[in-house]
Image (cartoon, rainbow, N blue to C red):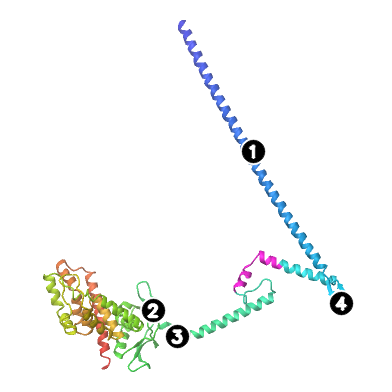
Amino acid sequence: MTTTTDTSHTNCRSFSSSSRSTDADGAERAFLQSFRNLRNTKHEQNVNNEFMMQREMRKQEEEKMNATLKKKKNSDDNNNNNNNNNKNDDDDGFVLKDTAAAKEEEEENETKKEKETKKREFPSKFDMNEKANKEFTPNRYDTQEKNEQRTKEQREMKRIEYDVKIKRNSKEREYQLSDHTNAIQGDGTVVKYYEKVDIKETNEGHDTYEILLDDKPLKSPTRNKFVLPNKLMACAIAEEWAMQDDNLIRPFTMPLMQLASTALDHMSKQEVFDFHKKKLLEFFDADQAVIAHPPGELRELQLETLEKVHKWAKTEFGDVLNLHSDSIFASPQTEEIKLLMEKRLRTLSAWEMTCTFAAAAAAKSLLIGLALTRNIITPEEALKCARVEEDYQIERHGFVEGGHDIDISDLRVRLTAPHTMNLILKAKTSS
């Protein structure tokens, strides 16, 4: 019995504690619900207050606007009444205008005012274009007949302008197909647009020739006349054009054409000639034919390969010319040698300067370039002089196909072309 009594007491205590927790939860939920209701009520009140304030502000604005419009209308009515009450000054006094004429005039003024207001408030593309071109732009306020007439005049003027332009450019259009600078593709080629190549003597001077592509004269890249100094050069460049096949023109296979275009379009200008002369003199101190490697096998090979160039240079410029240096760093030439070299370059023609600069740039040496154009050395000897260091390294480390062979072929062309053109120039009198 004692045991059962204790158990019952325990159960009573647990029941009472659970009931207390339930009451606390309910009270908490009730408090949260009342708080939410209060918050929602305040939010609704704020929203309503804001809405009422906005409505009141809109109402006040509308009243102000109506008052302004009413005031403006009253002032306009007063002005109209004053205008209608005006009297003409006559010999006998003031006479009122005829009522029908006054009414007509008033209507006319109102119509004009409405049009001006509409045009100012709602501008169209016609109005905006009219400011830019008042003569030819149709006006939406004009009649259809007037607009059609103006359109016809505009078309007629455009047709006349087009005819004048066609007549002015007729000569240029004639030579358009013979302009080899057109339609250059991404790989540097041009679609072939001719079938027959020929040469023709010009009337500009003795022994001057031009090239004909399908009986049309060839022009330079800057669309100047492509006049060559002798027949032999014309034949050589015409052969380059005739060799192009497969319906493609490859400008990189036409070195003589490139040199001739440079001479005619650029080097014939004095400022361009002086610029190239200055550049050659700037790099004369670091000439490849002057810089020597430290004593050893490579230096001996270098002196042996450049022997012809050094011998000619001493004869041409004297013993004052510095042909040897103790290291790879250049030793500056004396002012006397620089002035002498400048004098030699100044005596060259535009064609000779083009050949000299091209050869010197390819060989990286002014002395090698001059020796080549003076026919002291052959293109193959110039190639060996320019590549003496690379050839030495190739013998030691090996030859790379697809690299060294392409470089050698490219340099051979760049040295042979100015040498050949210079020979053609010298053969001018005997051609």
- The residue carrying pointer 2 sits among few (fewer than 14), some (14 to 19) or many (20 or more) residues within 10 Å by Cα, namely some
Distance, label 4 to label 3, CA atoms, is: 81 Å
Q: Is residue 64 above or below residue 359?
A: above
- The residue carrying pointer 4 sits among few (fewer than 14), some (14 to 19) or many (20 or more) residues within 10 Å by Cα, namely few
Mark 4 or 3: the one toward you: 4
* Residue occupied by mark 1: 45
Instruction: Please state the extent of the stretch shown in magenta in the rendering.
Output: 115-132
Element type at marker 3? helix
Mark 1 or 3: the one toward you: 1
Answer whether residue 138 is magenta in the image: no
Of pointers 4 and 3, the one earlier in the residue sequence: 4
Of pointers 2 and 3, the one earlier in the residue sequence: 3
Which is the main secondary structure of the residues drawn in magenta?
A: helix
- The residue carrying pointer 1 sits among few (fewer than 14), some (14 to 19) or many (20 or more) residues within 10 Å by Cα, namely few
* Residue occupied by mark 3: 174
* Residue occupied by mark 4: 91
Q: Amino acid at mark 3?
A: Glu
